[in-house]
Image: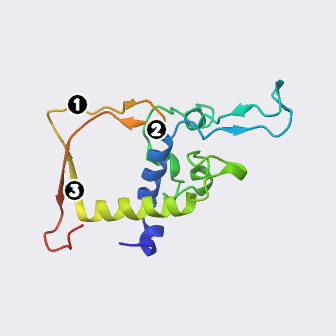
Amino acid sequence: MGLCDRPSLPRLEAFIYETLRYSSFVPLTIPHATTADVELDGFHIPKDTVVFVNQWSVNHDSRKWPEPQRFDPSRFLDAQQRLDRDRACSVMIFSSGQRRCIGEQLSKLQIFLFTAILLHQCSFHANPAERLTMGCVPGLALKPLPFTLTVEQRLPSLPAL
């Protein structure tokens, strides 16, 4: 399992982008300051004002994402079941513009490889005694509510992780 497999795994990429969109695990960007007086949608923002981008709000805007509270990886697939790259680029998780995270591309590659290898080599089972929810613990970074699961290696002959 490697990067050469990426083009043949559009559903996995769609799952990853929907996870990033839905979770918006860093809901607000790091603070920035305006370098000049700015007019934005009729609002005056003075120079040196500290501003944050609410990434969670961008990723849950119903004008862009129909039923934003529903986890639906298929929203990132086109009619031919290929990854819709334009749609994927609309997910705001690494900020935007000149202040976009310098490690974005490396992070996305690592997330893809990590997820692909785990899913290839392991099976995951939820605890049937627990009710799973999509809720989270708010904070600087959003964390899922506590849960337990069982992870098993798919084939004992595969090298250990």
**Disc number for residue 121:** none
Query: Which residue position is annotated with label 1?
Result: 131
Query: Which residue position is annotated with label 3?
Result: 123
In which quadrant will I find the C terminus? bottom left
Residue at 48% x, 68% y is: 7
Q: Secondary structure at mark 3?
A: strand
Query: Which residue position is annotated with label 2?
Result: 141
Dot 2 surroundings within 10 Å: few (below 14), some, or many (20 or more)? few
Residue at 23% x, 30% y is: 131
Q: Position of residue 159 (x, y in %)?
A: 21, 73
Q: Position of residue 158 (x, y in %)?
A: 19, 73
Badge 1 amino acid: Arg
Q: Measured along the vertical axis of the image, is residue 45 above or below residue 59? A: above
Badge 2 amino acid: Ala
Residue at 48% x, 64% y is: 109
Q: Name, please, the residue furthest toward the top.
A: 43
Q: Secondary structure at mark 1?
A: loop
Q: Secondary structure at mark 2?
A: loop
Give how far apart the Cα atoms at labels 2 and 3 are: 27 Å
| Callout in the foreground (2, 3) | 2
Q: Position of residue 107 (x, y in %)?
A: 50, 59
Q: Earlier in the sequence, mark 3 or mark 1?
A: 3
